[in-house]
Image (spheres, helix red, strand yellow):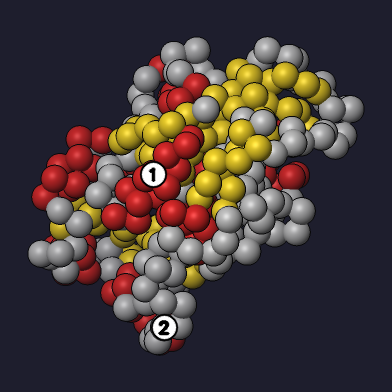
Amino acid sequence: MKAIIITQPGGPEVLQLAERPVPGLKPGEVLVKVAAAGVNRPDVAQRKGNYPPPPGASTEIPGLEIAGAVVELGADVNRWKTGDQICALVTGAGYSGYCAVPAGQCLPVPANLTLTEAASLPETFFTVWSNVFDRAKLQPGESLLVHGGSGGIGVAAIQMAKAMGCTVYVSAGSTEKCAFCEGLGADEAINYKTQNFKDEICRITNNKGVDVILDMIGGDYTPDNLLCLADEGRLVQINSMKGREVKIDLALIMRKRISITGSMLRSRDVAFKSAIAQNLEKHIWPFLASGQIKPIIYKTFPAAQAAEAHRLMESSDHMGKIILTF
């Protein structure tokens, strides 16, 4: 099969098209002929040598989400049959012509979506559900602030939270990106390059603050995140792009009864990820089928142009998802 491999840690140019053997199946897995694969920031980190994959995952072939057709079933697979169109969260090796996937991490492609559109869903939708709804327990009627609202995580979080009856605020880096987020349903978007997000959230909420913040920035965002949380607020950390070590005011946490949590999804086991898939199919897939939630794809690239896709990801010029097609 064709696969995109990381020839050595480095810039986008280290991604090369190569021939690799089709993977074998373990019990409980399905083999998928990949039509499209999503590009995500963890792929960039792995390419640079900054995000070692968990044991058993490919160190050579990146890629955390795919869509395609099931072509072979491993032992003990009951739900799927050959020919089924699925999208799936994978631990790695998504940038390849064929991918072996635990059956529980697969979801049916809604009839109104293409395989390319479906490939944009798993990594961000699994991440948002696990962190915003499972860990932070965002409830209908509560408010959510999402940093980086125009990226893949933001696009998913805005639409999922609005569909579940929540108020959504976002930060984004330009007037165009703010308008894009509001077009997706965000109640208000804050341009972090010209506005202070803490001051704006305090103004918008009349100093009440927001119930949940989904943050991938860390660093000097953290003290302001805590200041603009409401009483009983929850901060959920899924990355630390501006730094892992921060100073926080413990008295503020105690006074507001704030909870700080976070997670890394990639290293979790199949049972954990399969449970998220079940929740997504029950609670979110009907919104995709009805068109209330839509895949937002910024640009697609043939797999051989994976380096260009990574350059676009690192530029942060995109709004929505970046997809490789096979």
Q: Residue at x 79, y 33 (%)?
A: 29
Q: Does dot 2 land on a helix, a strand or a loop?
A: loop
Q: Does residue 155 sit above or below 13 in this rendering?
A: above
Disc 1 is placed on an element classified as helix
* x, y percent for residue 167: 29, 45
Residue 84 position in % (x across, y down): 66, 15
- Which of the 4 image quarters holds residue 199? bottom left
- Residue 159 visible in image: no
Residue at the (64%, 24%) spot, across then down: 33
Relative placement, left or right, of 207 versus 133 is: left
Crowding around mark 2 (Cα neighbors within 10 Å: few <14, some 14 to 19, many 20+) is few
Image coordinates of residue 215 in percent, x first then y, are 39, 62
Q: CA distance from mark 1 to mark 2?
A: 32 Å
Q: Is residue 264 something one can see in this rendering?
A: yes
Residue identified by numbered label 2: 246
| Amino acid at pointer 2 | Val
Is there a contact, CB below 8 Å, between mark 1 and mark 2?
Answer: no
Q: Nearer the viewer, residue 11 or 63?
A: 11
For image coordinates 60% across by 41% down, the residue present is: 18
Q: Which residue is mark 1?
A: 309
Residue at left offset 54%, top offset 68%: 50
* Quadrant into which the N terminus falls: top right
Q: As rendered, which of 98 and 192 lies closer to the eye?
A: 98
Image height of 34 relative to 253, above or below: above
What amino acid is labelled 1 in the image?
Answer: Ala
Eyeballing the image, is 113 above or below 142? above
Counting labels gives: 2
Instruction: Judge left or right: residue 86 versus residue 197.
Output: right
Ranked by sequence position, the earlier of labels 1 and 2 is 2
Rendered image quadrant of residue 270: top right
**Residue 57 position within the rendered picture, expressed as x and y whole percent measured from the top left:** 71, 52
